[in-house]
Image (cartoon, rainbow, N blue to C red):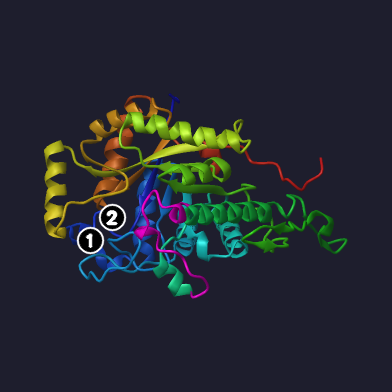
Amino acid sequence: MSTHLHLAVALDGAGWHPAAWREPDARPAELLTPAYWVDLVREAEAGLLDLVTLEDGLSLQSADRYRPDDRTDQVRGRLDAVQVAARVAPLTRSIGLVPTAVVTHTEPFHLSKAIATLDYVSTGRAGVRVKVGASPAEAAHLGRRRLPDVGTLAEDDAAGRAAVRELFDEAADWVEVLRRLWDSWEDDAEIRDVATGRFVDREKLHYIDFEGRHFSVKGPSITPRPPQGQPLVTALAHQQVPFELVGRSADVGFVTPTDTADARRIVGAVRSAQAAAGRAAETVHVFGDVVVFLDDDAATARARRDRLDERAGAPYESDAQVFAGTPAELADLLTDRAEAGLTGFRLRPATLPHDLRQVTTGLVPELQRRGLFRTAYEATTLRGLLGLPRPANRYATV
């Protein structure tokens, strides 16, 4: 196991439990204000966390993964994640900022520019979580393509498998375009020489000339190469095809193991996909996702979850493991999972700000006492925090 674990938190609305917005310390009237998000990210930064992810989508939140619902008792509506990250960036100093982008309906040229700009605004702390949009409802909002209703197809349905494969192949191409555009300016392409009147060396701007099934992009970007060279690319993966996307295209994969044996299986699948893509020598982090209800007393945490479930009218279920207990008990779980090969964890606070503060003031000190987490930020970029090198530019001649 690595000496230090990496920790991220996934921020979404008032928290991941649907009744979180009704908690006494929730701030439902402020969900669409900059101050709310600044406060949350600053709290995560006070806990020395590696990064925060910001959820996003192209349709209203829904209790159903594949189609909208008509509920009015849960948080609906959100701000654009990239723009929230850009607002938060100048008011933080060290933590990584990773907004979500729905790649199925978003042009890579636009997002390459937005994330490169975020990297400049944050002085090297930007990333992106690529999200495949398999919902026909999202497609209908854009009106540019039709998608099969994957949610109605059986797992052994050949058409369903082909549809999923197509969506994730498109996502892999999207990431490839993104990365090529970030490299389309060499690091020293800007001369800025007032005496000679030369601002840019045009020989150091490159056409990417990407031609694939899903995109045809000439380039170059209109934004110079970002401070990190390549901002972080992350993806959430639940099964084999998304594991392959992580191994082929991502710097960090977020996965959802049910226990330690499952974690070991998933890490093996990602490593195999990484090797198949010719990336065996590269560092690809695999973070385990856990929804957390944390309190100083385990019974209090479980009672809080029960109370929220009663208020929501149904037990809370998630794609990730749901943990209710103390920070010390969570530290035990994370330590065990790390032995299976996970290099970090992305925690989803059930309620905000309560469970986030339990992470920063309870879990982090516990991990520090065990020698498993940093006691200060030791790098100035997100890649640096994760031990990832700044990549060489693929178009530069040595």
Of residue 327 and residue 379, the one placed in the foreground of this image is 327
Residue 257 in view (yes/no): yes
Among numbered discs 1 and 2, the one appearing first in the sequence = 2
In the depicted structure, whether residue 304 falls above or below residue 261: below
Q: Main secondary structure of the magenta part?
A: loop
Q: Position of residue 260 (x, y in %)?
A: 33, 29
Question: Mark 1 to mark 2: distance in Å?
Answer: 7 Å
As drawn, the label of residue 393 is: none
What amino acid does circle 1 point to? Trp
Residue located at (38% from left, 33% from top): 263
Q: Assign a secondary structure to mark 2.
A: loop
Closer to us: 303 or 216: 216
Provide residue 206's location: percent of width, then percent of height.
77, 56
Q: How many marks?
A: 2
Please give left or right for residue 324 compared with residue 4 in the image.
left
Residue drawn at point x = 75 percent, y = 51 percent: 186
- In the rendered structure, does residue 153 fall within the stretch colored magenta? yes
Res. 377 in view:
no
Q: Secondary structure at mark 1?
A: helix
The residue at the point 35 percent across, 62 percent down is 66
Amino acid found under the numbered disc labelled 2: Gly
Boundaries of the magenta span: 143-161
- Quadrant of image for the N terminus: top left
Crowding around mark 2 (Cα neighbors within 10 Å: few <14, some 14 to 19, many 20+) is: many
In the picture shown, does residue 324 fall above or below 223?
Answer: above
Q: Position of residue 19 (x, y in %)?
A: 20, 59
Q: Position of residue 306 (x, y in %)?
A: 12, 49
Circle number at residue 15: 2
- Say if 321 sits above or below 19 in the image: above
What residue is disc 1 on? 21
**4 within the magenta span:** no
Tags 1 and 2 touching, CB below 8 Å: yes
